């Protein structure tokens, strides 16, 4: 049964059968001390509130029958998926640059099979969830995400995770371009950079690409139909 979601710039109606919760890149490399983002100098303090927020969003999604997708960013050990020597991804990707600049990190950052690539212990997929490995920032680029969503009749994507201004925003922009309705759960994600970067993505989403909501609003909306 569809339910009413408080959102910005206006309220939004969610049909659980046509919706997905997409958790973006909640991996040790992005979220845990000693991971890729730590080496890059990103402030990880926000994970103290974001990880529990995502846990609450997941619990609400499971109760409501909303399909959960997990995006997982990285490459094979040979970096074939990262692109050839002339690839812009090889040139611009910070994890790839770090591994070239610091030989002791080679094969350790966002590399499949490593701790860095794995999801954080507190957030693990459950049976029935769908894990989408992705080699670029957007969850749609070189993945099966679009076909898996369409084959399930899903047209609405509730998105959370990291980093708000990179992989989260890239995925939301592509969702808009693919004719999905994206909703950013703005307090269940954190940015790579200063606080104004988070604000900029929230502005972009609300103004141009979709809607934003909070974990409390999402949980309240999910509970409402069951208690009505």
Image (cartoon, helix red, strand yellow):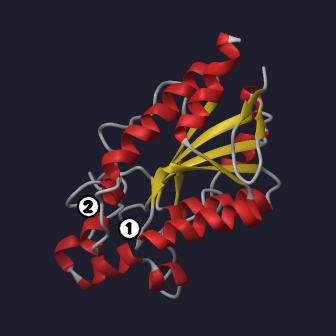
Identify the image quadrant of the C terminus: top right
Q: How packed is label 2: few (under 14 Cα within 10 Å), some, or many (20 or more)?
A: some
Relative image position of residue 146 (x, y in whole percent): 72, 49
> Is residue 203 or residue 42 the one in the foreground?
203
Q: Quadrant of residue 60?
A: top right
Residue 219 visible in the snapshot: yes
Which of the two labelled residues, at mark 2 and mark 1, occupies the earlier sequence position? 2
Measure how far apart labels 2 and 1 are at the Cα level.
20 Å
User: Which residue is drawn at the image coordinates 77% and 59% (left, top)?
Assistant: 176
The residue that label 2 is drawn on is 35
Asked which secondary structure carries label 2, the reply is loop
Relative image position of residue 222 (x, y in whole percent): 63, 25
Residue 81 visible in the snapshot: no
User: Which residue is drawn at the image coordinates 25% and 66% (left, top)?
Assistant: 38
Asked which secondary structure carries label 1, the reply is loop
Identify the image quadrant of the N terminus: top right
The residue that label 1 is drawn on is 78
């Amino acid at each position: 049964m569809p339910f009413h979601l408080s959102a910005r710039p206006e309220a939004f109606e969610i049909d659980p059968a046509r919706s997905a919760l997409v958790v973006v890149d909640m991996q040790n490399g992005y979220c845990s001390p000693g991971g890729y983002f730590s080496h890059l100098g990103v402030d990880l303090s926000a994970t103290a509130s974001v990880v529990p927020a995502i846990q609450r969003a997941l619990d609400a999604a499971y109760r409501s029958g909303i399909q959960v997708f997990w995006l997982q960013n990285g490459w094979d050990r040979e970096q074939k998926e990262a692109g050839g020597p002339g690839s812009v991804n090889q040139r611009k990707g910070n994890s790839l640059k770090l591994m070239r600049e610091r030989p002791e990190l080679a094969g350790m950052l966002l590399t499949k099979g490593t701790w860095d690539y794995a999801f954080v212990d507190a957030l693990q997929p459950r049976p029935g969830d769908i894990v989408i490995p992705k080699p670029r920032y957007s969850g749609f680029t070189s993945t099966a995400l679009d076909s898996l969503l369409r084959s399930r009749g899903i047209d609405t994507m509730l998105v959370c995770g990291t980093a708000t201004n990179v992989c989260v925003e890239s995925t939301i922009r592509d969702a808009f371009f693919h004719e999905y309705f994206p909703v950013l759960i703005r307090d269940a994600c954190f940015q790579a950079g200063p606080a104004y970067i988070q604000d900029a993505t929230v502005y972009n989403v609300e103004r141009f690409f979709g809607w934003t909501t909070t974990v409390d609003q999402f949980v309240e909306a999910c509970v409402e139909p069951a208690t009505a």
